[in-house]
Image: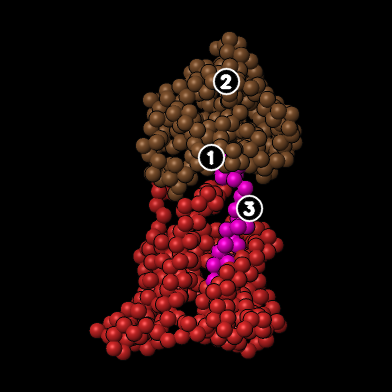
Chain colours: A red, B brown
Amino acid sequence: MEVLFLQLFNGISVSSILLLIALGLAITFGLMNVINMAHGELIMIGAYSTYVTQNIFMDLFPESMFGWYFVLAIPVSFLIAFVIGLILEFTLIRFLYGRPLDSLLATWGVALVLQQLARTIFGAPNVGVTSPSWLNGGLTVLDGVVFPYKRLFIIALVAVTLFIMYLYIYRSNAGRRMRAVMQNRDMAACLGVSTRRVDALTFAIGSGIAGIAGCALTLLGPIGPSLGTYYIVDAFMVVVLGGVGKLIGTVFGALGIGVTSTVFEFWTTASLGKVLVFVCIVAFLQWRPRGLVAMRTRQLDS
Amino acid sequence: MLAVQQLESGYGESIILRDVSLKVQPGQVVCLLGRNGVGKTTLMRSIMGVLKARKGLVSYNGKNLTKKSPGFRAKSGIGYVPQGREVFPQLTVYENILLGLEASSGKIKEIPADAIAKFPVLPAMYERRGGDLSGGQQQQLAFARALASRPEVLLLDEPCEGIQPSIVDDIRDVIRSIKEEGQTAILLAEQSLDFVKSVGDYFYILEKGAIAWEGGLEALSDEVIMRYLTV
């Protein structure tokens, strides 16, 4: 019983982290079809933004206030990654729409540049971010089954981020413009939608959400300049498995990979579990190349 | 008044339109005729700005639009119902029409009741996705979307192509009612001669990338039709 509970919780916890790192990519890759290899580095930027926020709090505010830095760090990480995404879109990405292979190479180059930039500014060794004290400890559910607050916090953060993204994409005017541009750029332009503004904003929002992911990752361990490279493959896996272009697919993709990898790792070893998960994904994509949630309409079929 | 002067346009290396000049006066229904492949759609796309003109001038009410984006032209009061309808397949019918309001730059917040009243089938389908509609329904949706921002000129590119006869009749009624209201001029590209004769005020015939003939309804004789339109 305890084992089942714990594994289930671990599975959901891993899924929530996967989902958080994939959500931004679901926008930049899923909606805009930019193969954004710098996504991991935007996560890294979010993580370092949290680190810097922490240091500023340590220097400027009394110790009693320190616990609150993390609440501020989330929007700060979003904003900094958002601005960097905006700059990236304006200087590079906008020339690469509709050229996926070029965008892959160019953004990979950007990733290397950003990594080196982080090394130059913060140094090559990992830096630690002290989690706020209110996230230490855990919730005791049963005897011997403790759900750490940090993990619960990440699950809640993902839920809130997802909800806000849903409202933005599917319920707001800006989201409607965004979906229109992604589905039929020329026609959206003919109706008076400013496609340039929509592109820039969409890419920046995807980048900003990567920043939030980076902020959350500081709760799980030390951060370094190559933080993003550990997560980029997983992020792409989630988006591709879920089905490109659908937010709900990304959620299912993350849950699928998170839960199955926890189960496999429980039955076998960490590395064999990972191998088995990848085998499953490859097999699944052979069967359904468009992923879990495929877009299907008359227009696309014809 | 929408005016096109000595327009040259095309795709890549190939020039489709060499020298096209036409005018659409306020409230007028102007029809663009011509055999397949003479460049009717190319002309529509060049007027809307989807295709950039190589030479010549597109102007609206004296404003030069030749170098402007499609969005700017839409906001100047030009509505566009493209060939193939181009509704947004993943968006609901309601969202599709709401996007038509973008051209009003926020001045129109609600879908105008009179614009939607012309298409009584649409409100019942508001929650369905645009891509799930039939061709005729999509055509009506594209119409409603273009009319939502109350354009002063409406570009209609083959609105009856591949559509069942009863809906062709509906579309004819819609064009007539727009004409009677007199607020919106129409530039209509269409293959069906019967259709254009039943709604048109003035006619241009395109041939080899240039205007080969122009005139009113009474001048559009069988001789002209034989000369320029029969295959």
The chain containing the residue under callout 3 comes to A
Q: Does the magenta stretch include residue B144?
A: no
Circle on res. B182: 2
The chain containing the residue under callout 1 comes to B
Res. A277 in view: no
Query: Where on the picture, by quarter, is residue B230?
Result: top right
Q: Relative to the observer, which residue lies in front, B95 or A117? A: B95
Q: In this figure, what is the number of numbered marks? A: 3
Residue at image mark 3: A197
Left or right, A118 with reference to B144: right
Q: Distance between the residues labelled 2 and 1?
A: 23 Å
Residue B210: give x, y in percent of width and height.
67, 27
Assign the N terminus of chain B to one quadrant of the image. Answer: top right
Q: Distance between the residues labelled 3 and 1?
A: 21 Å
The chain containing the residue under callout 2 comes to B
- The amino acid marked with disc number 1 is Lys
Q: Residue at coordinates 29% horizontally, 85% vertically from top-left?
A: A142
- The amino acid marked with disc number 3 is Arg
In this view, the residue farthest toward the top is B218
Q: Give the range drawn in magenta.
A: A187-212
Left or right, A106 with reference to A187: right
Around disc 1, counting alpha carbons within 10 Å, would you say few (fewer than 14), some (14 to 19), or many (20 or more)? few
Q: What element carries label 3?
A: helix
Q: Is residue A200 magenta?
A: yes
| Dots 3, 1 in contact, CB < 8 A | no
What secondary structure predominates along the stretch shown in magenta?
helix
- The amino acid marked with disc number 2 is Gly
Residue at image mark 1: B109
Q: What element carries label 1?
A: loop
The mark that comes first in sequence, 2 or 1, is 1
Q: Relative to the observer, which residue lies in front, A183 or A44? A: A44
